[in-house]
Amino acid sequence: MYPDAKHISTPHAYKTIILVPNITTIKLQDHFIYVTGTRGTLTLKLHKSIDVQQLHDEKKLLVYTNENINIKNKALIGTTHALINGMITGVTTGFTKKLQLIGIGYRVAVQNNIISLTIGFSHSINYTLPVEITATCPSQTEITITGINKQIVGQIAADLRSLRPPEPFKGKGIRYINEIVHNKDTKKR
């Protein structure tokens, strides 16, 4: 345990500091980091060339490498910094993605952990959600996906959007709420 960030002061040391809110706890064990907050716990396995240390007040994390400083290690430090920040945000406030269905007869319904989509096929499509993700429908044409893991929430939203992406002429399909879809002009004679 280092008393402060100045302890690591090799001439080419590359390091970043992450501030930890009071409502989250961080546990470091065997190259794993565990972040616990009001919404749950997330785990991250650290790369072998990256180290994380809690500073003396335990509300700051130091992300650094003692190996050669090269582009790869700088990128790994930045990536680890972003992943830990995302974990802290996830366990405190969570992540949300909103989708809307545009098209005649397009609707969505959520029952238990299954999203049922009617999007112009001859049958409705059922999408089963993982346990840690929740979905709600504010209306028949909107769906909100919520969870603590940013990667899983984004992947589920992308999977649902890929079932019927917005087509370029009329814009029918599934899109993110604030997504801008550029429509093509129709063929003119």
Image: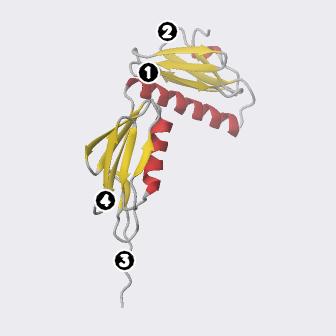
User: Which label was assigned to residue 102?
Assistant: 4
Closest to the observer, 123 or 46: 123
Dot 1 amino acid type: Gly
Dot 4 amino acid type: Ile
Residue under pointer 3: 185
Q: Pick out the residue farthest to the front.
A: 123
- Give the left or right position of residue 170, taking residue 3 as reference: left
Residue found 69% across the figure and 38% down from its top? 72
Closest to the observer, 108 or 175: 108
Closest to the observer, 18 or 163: 163
Residue found 31% across the figure and 57% down from its top? 106
Dot 2 amino acid type: Asp
Q: Pick out the residue farthest to the right.
A: 68
Tell me the SS state at disc 1.
loop
Q: Which sits earlier in the primary sequence, circle 2 or circle 3? A: 2
Residue found 37% across the figure and 27% down from its top? 93
Dot 3 amino acid type: Asp
